[in-house]
Image (cartoon, rainbow, N blue to C red):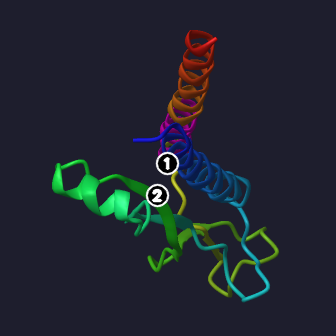
Amino acid sequence: MSILKSMDISATGLAAQRLRMNILSSNLANAQTTRTAEGGPYKRKDVIFSAVPTGNSFEDLLDETHDTKLQKVRVTGIHEDQKPPRRVLDPSHPDADAEGYVDLPNIQVMTEMVNMIAATRAYEANATAINDTKQMALKALEIGR
């Protein structure tokens, strides 16, 4: 496996986790949003990842024969939660219906925070992998001198 391929795999992980953190931040920021441009309360979003082969080069085909199927991360979509909103009794709220209920986003703040911590740790792991790969490349260059 080449050093560049290792960095490419980690870079796709960084980009995917960065997008995930952005989506989670949006969920947290809109946990109380009752009006959107589409109408109704904000709907929770989540990122869908998939694993894709690193490439179709001859070297990749040879690697697959040795059970080293290298794959990188691809964001395949952003899923919008279809669960119904939470209904909360608050007659003083400007968006309350005739019965005094307000539709709030179906977002659990603690769940979003746990997901944010997991995304942050995954991001840090990919950053560490890139730094370690870079250090190995520098050491290899020092040996060659």
Where does residue 49 sit, x and y in percent of width and height?
Answer: 44, 63
- Secondary structure, mark 1, is helix
Instruction: Give the residue at x 58% y 32%.
Output: 130
Residue 129 screen position, x and y as percent: 51, 30
Q: How many neighbours does mark 2 have within 10 angstroms: few (below 14), some (14-19), or many (20 or more)?
A: many
In which image quadrant can residue 53 be found? bottom left
Whole-Å distance between the Cαs marked 2 and 1? 7 Å
Q: Which mark is residue 9?
A: 1
Mark positioned earlier in the residue sequence (2 or 1) = 1
In this rendering, the answer to whether 16 lies above or below 33 is: above
What is the span of residues highlighted in magenta in the rendered image?
111-124
Q: Amino acid at mark 2?
A: Val
> Vertically, is 42 above or below 122?
below
**Residue 51 placement: quadrant:** bottom left
- Residue at (71%, 78%) from the top-left corner? 96
Give amino acid for label 1. Answer: Ile
Judge by depth and name the residue closer to the eye, 46 or 99: 46
Query: Could you tell me which secondary element the residue under label 2 belongs to?
Result: strand
Residue 123 drawn in magenta: yes
> Which residue is rendered at x = 46% and y = 41% of the image?
2
- Residue lying at 68% horizontally and 51% vertically, measured from the top left: 25
Question: Is residue 21 one of those drawn in magenta?
Answer: no
Quarter assignment of residue 134: top right
Q: Residue 127: where, in percent of width, then height?
A: 59, 32
105 or 96: nearer the viewer: 105
Marks 2 and 1 close (CB-CB < 8 Å): yes
Magenta stretch, main secondary structure, is: helix
Which numbered mark, 2 or 1, is in the foreground of this view? 1
The crowd level at tag 1 (other Cα within 10 Å; few <14, some 14-19, many 20+) is some
Q: How many marks?
A: 2
Tell me if 118 is positioned left or right of 105 in this view.
left
Q: Which residue is mark 2?
A: 73
